[in-house]
Amino acid sequence: MRLFLSECYRLDHAICDRKFFEWQFQADPSDGNASVLCGWENDRLVGILGYLPFSVHWGELGNPYPAVWLLYWMVRKETQRGLGWLLTKRIQEKYTLLLTVNASELGGPFFKKLGWAFFPRVARYTCVFDKKQCVPLLFPSAIESDLDKMIFRPIFPDPDSITEVALNKENYHPDWKLYSGLSFGTVRSLSYLTWRYFKHPVFKYYVILKGEAQRPAVCIYRIEKAFGIYDALVGRIVDFFHPDDKQGKTDGLILMQGVLQYLKNKGCSYVDFICSNRTYSQTFLDLGADEEPNDRQILPVRITPIQHTLRHQNFAFLAPQGGHFPVLENMHITKSDIDGDGPALIPKNDSR
């Protein structure tokens, strides 16, 4: 496996780091087995496909459905065509609900041929804290006045201060029937959030709650240091959800404003939020954010280093025959789903 990864990826790519690999593919500490399907030619590893089984809400809150997320599909260039298809078909034989994000240019058409629903763009929203800092980061096709439509506008005069929490059964056991916005998406269980955020080998995530344990509003974010043509701090909202009722929406709005105010006070130039769900993204819009256009970008997505390359997060799924087939806006797909929010490289002197 190590030889395959070193020959197919950059040596500083995250997947080539053992600690990251074992976390990403949930390697068993007792025997090292990981959730990776392998393709072989004789004794030579020629292709891999990662798969992570997780419970997913699929139209029935409180009745999780077994699903699998696919990630890191890679086949050697010189390998006979068809191996990628065989690996995917093998997974499809075991699961009836499959999902993936950030398929490559080849992957998108490939999944569509296999009958998957493919969405080329999950909406991205941006909110500006410091216009002066953002000007040097603008895409060449953008102009300074584009930033005026996405300036942070607090609603509450005295927002709550935010405090990071360590999740546990006492402070986090949501009644999922209160969260219609999560009707289609990964179950945000305590075990899932612990693996995805608290055990991440590279990024430092912050989880903030507001409300009672059975009905919390939840916001998860991190701060990234942009470098290249300009140095800046950028906030990343990677997940956000709240109960449906009036109190839940209010808690969500107060929570989101508190997080944005904190990011502004920390010196972030802007913050972004990739989210398919219109209910939860509306809270971000209410505080001054704006949705990114379909055909161009104002501020960069890739910032380590800064790249002015048009890039959208895509999403695809294969649903059970005769089952629910939701529109993207009713699903909850975010930047952090499985491997959507990953490091561009592993820092040589990583402090985590």
Image (spheres, rainbow, N blue to C red):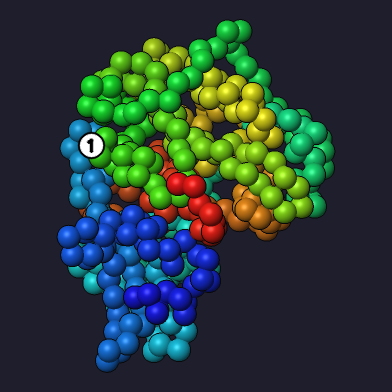
Residue drawn where x is 47% and y is 40% of the image: 204
Q: Which quarter of the picture shows residue 32?
A: bottom left
Name the side, left or right, on which 37 lies relative to 244. Answer: left
Identify which amino acid the numbered label 1 is placed on: Glu
Residue 188, percent across and down? 31, 37
Query: Along the line of sight, which residue is nearer the eye, 192 or 331?
Result: 192
Q: Residue 40's spot in the image, x, y percent?
A: 29, 84
For residue 6, side relative to residue 291 (left or right): left
How many marks overall?
1
Establish if 23 lies above or below 271: below
Q: Residues within 10 Å of mark 1 (few under 14, many from 20)?
A: some
Residue 242 can be seen, yes or no = no
Please name the residue shown 49% across and 35% down the image.
Answer: 221
- Residue 121 percent across, percent down from the top left: 53, 51
User: Residue 132 appears in which quarter of the rendering?
Assistant: top right
Residue displayed at 34% across by 21% down: 216
Task: Give the camera-side residue of 203 and 158.
Answer: 203
